[in-house]
Image (cartoon, coloured by chain):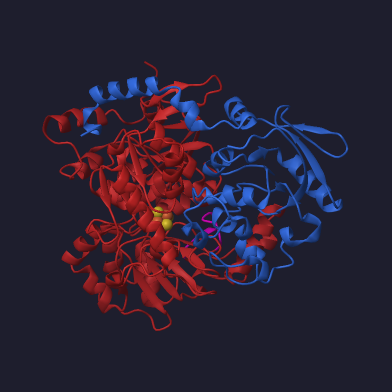
Chain colours: A red, B blue
Amino acid sequence: MKAQTLYEKLWTSHLVRQEADGTALIYIDRHLVHEVTSPQAFEGLKLAGRKPWRVGSIVATADHNTPTEHWDQGITDPVSRQQVETLDANIRESGALAYFPFKDERQGIVHVIGPEIGAILPGMTVVCGDSHTSTHGAFACLAHGIGTSEVEHVLATQCLLQKRSRTLLIRVEGELQHGVSAKDVVLAIIGVIGTAGGTGYAIEFGGSAIRALSMEGRMTVCNMAIEAGARAGLIAVDETTIDYLKDKPFAPVGALWDQAVDYWRTLHSDDGASFDKEVVLDAATIAPQVTWGTSPEMVAPVGGRVPDPARETDPVKREGITRALKYMGLAPNTLISDIPVDQVFIGSCTNSRIEDLREAAAVAKGRRKAASVKRVLVVPGSGLVKRQAEAEGLDQIFRAAGFEWREPGCSMCLAMNADRLEPGDHCASTSNRNFEGRQGAGGRTHLVSPAMAAAAAVTGRFGDWRELA
Amino acid sequence: MKAFSVLDGLVAPLDRANVDTDAIIPKQFLKSIKRTGFGPNLFDEWRYRDHGEPGEDCSVRPVNPDFVLNQPRYQGARILLTRDNFGCGSSREHAPWALEDFGFQVLIGTSFADIFFSNCFKNGLLPIVLPAAEVDKLFDDCAANEGYCLVVDLGAQTVTRPDGRSLKFEIDAFRKECLLNGWDDIGLTLRHADAIREFESKRRSEHPYYYA
Ligand code: SF4
């Protein structure tokens, strides 16, 4: 048989039918649902007199709008509350495999809770009305972010209309320098291929540096595949994947587990499989990264400088750099380490898992928030992460350092709730988007790893956290 | 879904790359549970001088006169001219809803982000990809000529300039059919319900652990 890529294997095993022009019906195994992109879909379904096809595929939670403090007061913003209550009502009416409503002890960011309960299994197709669904590709799942009309389509038909993507293999080979994390790897990749570099592709991440990552690290990488323009990111199954899933509440057990594992072990690209494009990075050359602009591709290694638009020859890019520097309040050629830090956000579906919090806590331990930093928010990705961190005493470390320890949710990743930047504030953020206004109107986001964010909090600058150790 | 066939419309140029969905419709407006009413908040942070919140009367807000869509010559524009990677960022369908609600029916650019691109087709909005040199030319012509209009013919897959020159564009046959006829995807897919059921029962028996 012809050598196949992982993407081809996943695609073929979910293909229900195909139109002459290649438009295909792809069967969906897991449907993650949250409050922001689902109300119009449930409403549309109801108006058309349709019923969900398979509610056993649905895992739902409220995360985008929920507050991260004063849970006893409920959701005070009436518009946010209405959206969360609409989700409650829709799930109550339709049913689901699992629902973690506001205040449930397992509530959290949709992309954190799916994997941690074992509801995301290798070989699945996974969709969610959320672009960071690419996260689940870390489990060798074909995972797509979809729009609300597609949410309705999947609810009604258990299928998604898709065109086959081209395949891009990004190999990161060699050993990462000490203290360089998955976040730095993915930011460096985006710096190389650009935010549109993956458009039209499914990206498979491979190479020895990727294989050496934990599942948390792999999720961080796949999470940001969408920031490179790719709707899906993928990583092959190996022992790390299987070990992670063992004994998770929704993972199979006994004979079913054995049968599943036999199949999962086939979920990798075959030797000799051909990709439409291949990019190779040398792991050893990747330093901790800091974004300086308003797009994730506007990134520099720590110790580097902000670019000078005068040196850019492409006029559209030059204009983009000029506009970004103006918005960010930065002069050309500024040293990254001279950018001020006003706030710090440690959280989001990119970096709010237990491993991320451990990394941040290791830097914060025995240190204090710099006086120039107004606020440091630590927002765990889920209730389970929160309790695990508390069991390890990480919350105490953060509190002792003057950081705020919050309830789980999306929080200041997109600032739909009360957590947001003041105009002009520079924020060291472990999230995934540094777009204008993303963390609050006029806010200036610098994307970094958890260790870099914690270092920014205690030093008040974007220095190399490894020099603190 | 609304059908689309031919449009003769005024063009507005948004001359920047990587316009993201947070810029198209900021998150505070995503709290709505409706599909309509997003037009007044399209490009909210660029269009107005103050910070917008849902439910506000936008007609009394201070506008930014420099923003292209606020300029008198572009009032009533139906075609938005853009650069690379338009619609990048989140999957929010509120972005095409806002563009459509504002009055746009066609977007012309050099590339569109994947999720945004498919969301457009679900809402009767036609995103057209043209080569960079052609897009450059359209930007120049649009800036030089007040009242610059283009004719977009989906059936013929052409964009025709005022001088009569036509540019061909590509589109998937299936998407084209759906858009021309205003077909609802779900209805179309449900015609294959038997095939889906058959696929599902086969999958259930081969991979029972996905159904536990
Ligand atoms: S944490 Fe941020 S990126 Fe992730 S799902 Fe929430 S809002 Fe989206």
**Position of A306 compared to B205: left or right?**
right
Is residue A294 within the magenta segment?
Answer: yes
Picture residue at 35% right of the left edge, 79% below the top: A369
Quadrant in which ligand 1 is drawn: bottom left
Q: Quadrant of residue B121?
A: top right
The outermost residue toward the left is: A254
Location of residue B158 in the rendering, given as x and y in whole percent from the top left corner: 75, 31
Is residue A295 within the magenta segment?
Answer: yes
**Position of B8 compared to B58: left or right?**
right
Which secondary structure type mostly characterizes the magenta part of the structure?
loop
Does residue B140 lie above or below A423 as drawn? above
Q: Quadrant of residue B204?
A: top left
Does residue B178 lie above or below A353 as drawn? above
Picture residue at 25% right of the left edge, 33% below the top: B210
Q: Quadrant of residue A211?
A: top left
Q: In this picture, which residue range is highlighted in magenta?
A: A293-302
Does residue A175 lie above or below A8 as drawn? below
Picture residue at 61% right of the left edge, 26% below the top: B177
| Image quadrant containing the N terminus of chain A | top left
